[in-house]
Image (tube, grey):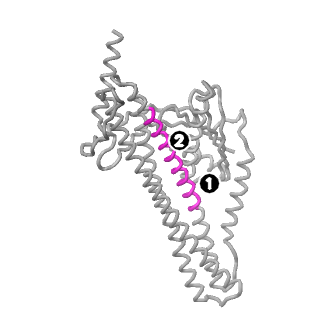
């Protein structure tokens, strides 16, 4: 009776994977469905099942191969298909990296040209100039154009970040498919060896996507602050040109800078105590945990009560198992913490107000991220 049940389960799993075909369609990768699970303390919502991806009906399958003397198996064919999907994902990631490099070059060039013009205006005002000097007015107009070109890179980064999130979702879906294939019957030893290599390659690709998303989040945060500050400085500089007298940077910019400097110092000097109660607890006990809305609500309320609030973001990993398992848990918890930090930046929380820490807990059963407010 036990053997029959195992054969039935294996047959069902084989039928499911056979029906899925390739995980990619001709028009692009189908994004993995995200599960719905958010916590403000301990709330968890059961995940919704991922939709079946569109089958690839025209793209030629990757060549089938097997070790010498071993038969070609159904599992081997699935490995070939998933390897082809991984290749397409890696090509897409390379394209994302190229787009990021191009955007960064445009922003750098615009910023260099802007500050060159700004330097000429400042030098002329410092030597003394007539009120409303037309040369300075023309240079100010050119500097304004260069600054707005830098500002145009922000929506480009936002679009790129969304595309990277789609790639990350598909990478998670592909990883789940690879891990599910281990349970299929009828495989030979070389099939599982290739599955292990494929699983490692998928994980490495996901690490690259995570780093890309982190770089994008940091760049967008910096560019937003930079453009807003320089727009205020341009307003003050316009008044200086009108009066023919150099004033300096905007007073609003100085006030903001001083506030952020004090907040950053406070954030770095604080460490959560054992008696402190977290503002938010996010448990990563399943893939694609949807925590953003609960996180936004909690942080929004905290900032409304205390506009100068600072935060400690603590990535907690279980201290269980072998040394290798503990190290893997710590690495996964760090990635989860970086993902939450990216979400906070995208929500508009200045990075200087958030301090990220890592801890191991013998009582934790899954990776968690705790957010404390000060």
Residue 186 lies, in percent from the top left, at: 33, 23
139 in relation to 224, above or below = below
Q: Residue at x 66, y 66 (%)?
A: 253
Which residue is outermost to the top? 1
Mark 2 sits on what residue? 294
Q: Secondary structure at mark 1?
A: loop
Foreground residue among 235 and 95? 95
Q: Identify which residue, 251 or 179, lies in the foreground.
A: 179
The relative height of residue 351 versus residue 200 in the rendered view (above or below) is below
CA–CA distance in space, label 1 to label 2: 19 Å
Point out residue 110 in the picture as x, y percentages from the top left corner.
54, 71
Q: Is residue 214 left or right of residue 61?
A: right
Residue 79 percent coordinates (x, y): 36, 34
Residue ID for mark 1: 350
The boundaries of the magenta stretch are 196-224
Quadrant, the C terminus: top right
């Amino acid at each position: 009776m036990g053997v029959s049940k195992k054969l039935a389960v294996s047959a069902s799993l084989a039928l499911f994977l056979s029906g899925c075909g390739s995980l990619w369609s001709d028009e692009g990768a189908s994004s993995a469905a995200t599960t719905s699970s958010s916590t403000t303390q301990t709330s968890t919502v059961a995940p919704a099942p991922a939709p079946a991806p569109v089958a690839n009906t025209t793209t030629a399958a990757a060549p089938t191969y097997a070790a010498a003397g071993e038969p070609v198996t159904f599992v081997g064919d699935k490995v070939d298909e998933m390897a082809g999907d991984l290749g397409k994902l890696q090509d897409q990631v390379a394209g994302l990296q190229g787009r990021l490099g191009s955007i960064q070059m445009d922003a750098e060039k615009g910023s260099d040209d802007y500050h060159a013009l700004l330097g000429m205006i400042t030098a002329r005002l410092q030597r003394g100039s007539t009120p409303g000097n037309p040369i300075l007015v023309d240079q100010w107009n050119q500097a304004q154009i260069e600054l707005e070109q830098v500002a145009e890179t922000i929506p480009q980064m936002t679009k790129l970040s969304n595309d990277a999130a789609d790639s990350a979702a598909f990478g998670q879906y592909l990883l789940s498919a690879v891990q599910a294939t281990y349970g299929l019957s009828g495989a030979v030893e070389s099939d599982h060896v290739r599955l292990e290599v494929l699983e490692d390659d998928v994980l490495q690709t996901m690490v690259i996507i995570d780093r890309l998303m982190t770089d994008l989040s940091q760049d967008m945060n910096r560019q937003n602050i930079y453009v807003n500050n320089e727009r205020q400085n341009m307003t003050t500089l316009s008044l200086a040109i009108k009066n023919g007298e150099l004033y300096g940077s905007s007073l609003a910019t100085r006030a903001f800078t001083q506030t952020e400097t004090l907040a950053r110092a406070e954030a770095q000097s604080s460490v959560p105590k054992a008696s402190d109660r977290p503002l938010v607890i996010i448990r990563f006990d399943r893939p694609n945990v949807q925590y953003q809305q609960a996180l936004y609500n909690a942080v929004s309320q905290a900032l409304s009560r205390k506009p100068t609030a600072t935060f400690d973001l603590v990535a907690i990993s279980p201290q269980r198992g072998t040394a290798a398992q503990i190290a893997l848990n710590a690495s996964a918890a760090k990635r989860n913490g970086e993902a939450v930090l990216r979400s906070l930046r995208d929500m508009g929380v200045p990075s200087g107000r958030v301090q990220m820490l890592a801890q191991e807990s013998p009582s934790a059963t899954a990776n968690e991220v705790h957010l404390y407010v000060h």
